Image (spheres, helix red, strand yellow):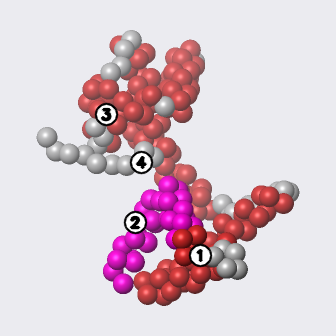
Amino acid sequence: MRRLLRCRWTDEELYLLARVEAQLTTDTGKCANVDLLAKLPQLQRTPEAIKGQRRSAKYKGLVKGCLEEIALSASGPASRGSITEQPVEERVLTAESTSEVAQAQDPAIAVDVPLSPKTARVLETLLAGAERRVKCSGRGAENAKRHRRTFRKQTQDDSTPGSGSRRKLRRAKNARVQELFRKYPSRAAAEVLDTLGS
C-alpha cells in the first residue's frame, strides 16, 4: 500500500468531504470513512485522516450545514435542478477559483480598532520579532547567528542582576533553554545544533 502523507486540510477539502458525507447520509442513511475514501480518491487521504476530521466540531458544523442545504434544495424544485447539473467537485473547484479571483481584485480594507495597552505591547513585540526575522532571512545563516547572539546578550543583560554567580547564570540559562524548548521545540533544536556546529 502506498503511504499517503498530507498535513493540513484546506477549507475546500473539508467542505467537499462534508458535502459528500451529507449526500451519502441522505441517500443511504449511513456514511463510513471507507465510503468517503471511495467517493473522494482525489483527496489522497487515509481513512485515519478522514476519521480524525470527522470528529472535529468544525467539520460536524459543516456537515450539519450541508444537510440543511440539501434539505432546502430538496424542498425547492428550482434549486434542485441546479444541484444536479453540476457535480460537487466542479462546484468546489469553481468556488475555489472565484475566491482566488475575488481576493486578487479586492484591495485590503483598513479598519481602525482601538487597542488596549497590553494588546498594543503584544502587537509591538510580535511586529519587532517579525522585522527581526525578515532582516535575518536575507542575510544568510552567519548573520542570523550573530543577530541571535546579540538578541540573547541583550535579554541576558536585562534579566541578570549586576553581580551573579556562575551557578545562578547557568541555572538561568538552563531555565531559558527549557522554556524555549517547551514553547518552540524546533527553534530550540536549531539553537542546539548551531551551538554544536560552532
Q: Is residue 133 visible?
A: no
The percent position of residue 128, horizontal first and vertical second, equals: 67, 73
What is the C-alpha distance between the residues marked 2 and 3?
A: 29 Å
Between discs 4 and 2, the one toward the N terminus: 4
Q: Amino acid at mark 3?
A: Glu
Instruction: Tell me: 7 left or right of 164.
Output: left
Between disc 1 and disc 2, the foreground one is 1
Between discs 4 and 3, the one toward the N terminus: 4
Read off the magenta span. 170-198
Label drawn at residue 48: 3
Residue projecting furthest to the left: 1
Asked which quadrant contains residue 75, the reply is top right
Q: Which residue is mark 4?
A: 8
The percent position of residue 92, horizontal first and vertical second, equals: 45, 41
What is the C-alpha distance between the residues marked 1 and 3?
A: 53 Å
- Which secondary structure lies at badge 2? helix
Badge 1 vs badge 4, beta-carbon distance below 8 Å = no
Q: Residue at x 66, y 60 (%)?
A: 106
Q: Residue at x 54, y 62 (%)?
A: 175
The percent position of residue 114, horizontal first and vertical second, equals: 85, 57
Q: Which residue is mark 2?
A: 189
Q: Amino acid at mark 2?
A: Ala
Does the magenta stretch mainly form a helix, a strand or a loop? helix
Please tell me how crowded label 1 is: few (under 14), some (14-19), or many (20+) other residues with Cα within 10 Å: few
- Which secondary structure lies at badge 4? loop
Q: Is residue 76 above or below residue 129?
A: above
